[in-house]
Image (tube, grey):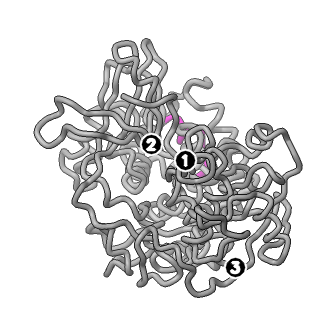
Amino acid sequence: MDATRPLKAPNTAIPSSGVTSASPQITPPIDQIMKISPDFDRRNVEKYWGLIAKEMASKGLTSKNQVIAICATICAETTTFAPIKEAGRYFEYDPFRGRGFVQLTWKEDYLAVGKALGLGDKLIRDPDMAMEPELAAKILVWEWMRGYNVSKYAEKGDFANCRSIINRGHPNKIHQTTQSGTVKFHAAVKRGLQFVTMGIDGNTIGSVPLSGDYGLGCVDTGSGGSRVLSGLNPGSQGDALAYALGIHALDNQRSHIFKAQLDVASLPQILDLDAQTTFEGKGLGEGLDGTYTVDEITFYFGRTLTADIVAYKPDPNASQPQVFLHDANTARPIGDNSPTQPIAAGEIPGKIYAAAIQARGSDTSNGPDGGKNACAFAVNKFCLLPAGLKMIGSAVPPYGVPVSVAACETALKGGRGKLITRAEAVPGDIWVQSDRHIGICATAGCTRVLSNSSSKAKFQWEDAIEKVNSFYGNSPEKIYRVLN
């Protein structure tokens, strides 16, 4: 195994970008859901609330009380509004530990929900399926309506018994402890009653039909008839489909997915692994051995330190990955960096951000100083040009793109961009620490910045803006919106 330090794989959720939305705004809106818990990650709510609302609406769970009770339950069960796997070692029910939005647990429950949802014993054979967002949303609603039927209690505002049934399996059995999530649950309910003003309007739940590939010839759309789409503001049909499916243009490059839970004490090399680095799989079986690239490592602290590893094996027969621009039916190979037709000004940040996410992890060692001073190089090569925009600054031989932060900022000041505040920033705006570093805003409000890593010569360093500022000496920062 070769790498440096363990690192969580990059989050590839696509936040709102300011582009005109292709689907209605789901109610209650994301801003109200966010107020239910300060621990909710907005990126998760934007990505998953539509899936959950759609499933709730299909079962008639549309009242304000149902929304509050379910979101408060997600708060108590997952904290950040994302499907999770229960941490630690639980010998009495492994491998059927808690998973999903509501922590499905025990073999009999995995089997029951699998049969109820037409999956047979697939969940028994692969319990991690319960982590797949669309299935996790269905499991959440199944848990809500089975047995003692939590929905009846939620409808009449009996939130205490909602928690009792979910956590203890029976009404009137909850313990008021932090461990059971009850304190967190009731705090979330209180905020929900204060800030949530409406239930779910089923007519506002948009979906993307999958009757064709919409120009995404290099991805498998699967067998579903549609996928929910909420709050993503796609710039094209191709973007909308990719976001709704939760895929990106490189997905077809993978022939095998490797998942394992390993004991760190017996295999300490795990501590040297890093996302986007590789290891050799040996003794896995015919056709399975080979080089795997790490996607994600999650550590669990229980009686012993364990690690869940997710990695993939590249597919040598995969078709060439594509970069998708404004027209869903026009694609071009990666490496074709010629500017295309002008993009509407309102779409520019979203296009830059989409290109940046697709390029995350790209090697910059062919840039200045072997990639150690390649921040301006990376922003132009991987973000501006693939988005169909001209470079900012003047190209420098032999690199073919601008390599100076100062030159980029001069171009932005000279008409290519406008200065904005951090509060106004959206994903895809340009963050600059004058003469020192340049990167792409990765979140609304530019709370995180994605830029080149000088130590690894890769376009993969995403960190809190305060940490990036501090690393470069807290020189004055500026944020620009590219205009043309």
The reply, left or right, for residue 33 in relation to residue 460 is right
Query: How far apart are the two marked residues, 3 and 2, measured between alpha carbons?
Result: 32 Å
Q: What residue does disc 3 label?
A: 346
**The C terminus lies in quadrant:** bottom right
Residue 9 lies, with reference to residue 334, above or below; the image says above
Could you tell which of marks 1 and 2 lies nearer the N-terminus? 2
Could you tell which of marks 3 and 1 lies nearer the N-terminus? 3
Q: At label 2, which amino acid type do we have? A: Gln
Q: Nearer the viewer, residue 237 or 124?
A: 237
Q: What residue does disc 1 label?
A: 458
**The N terminus lies in quadrant:** top left
Q: At label 1, which amino acid type do we have? A: Lys
Query: How far apart are the two marked residues, 3 and 1, measured between alpha carbons?
Result: 29 Å
Q: Residue furthest right?
A: 476
Q: What residue does disc 2 label?
A: 276
**Are circles 1 and 2 on residues that touch, CB within 8 Å?**
yes
Mark 2 residue element: loop
Q: Which residues are magenta?
A: 156-164
Image location of residue 380, percent across then percent down: 63, 65
Give the class, few, some or many, for how many residues have Cα within 10 Å of label 2's Cα (few <14, many ≥20). many
- Specify the principal SS of the magenta part: helix
Could you tell which of marks 3 and 2 lies nearer the N-terminus? 2
Give the class, few, some or many, for how many residues have Cα within 10 Å of label 3's Cα (few <14, many ≥20). some
Residue 311 lies, with reference to residue 306, above or below; the image says below
Q: At label 3, which amino acid type do we have? A: Gly
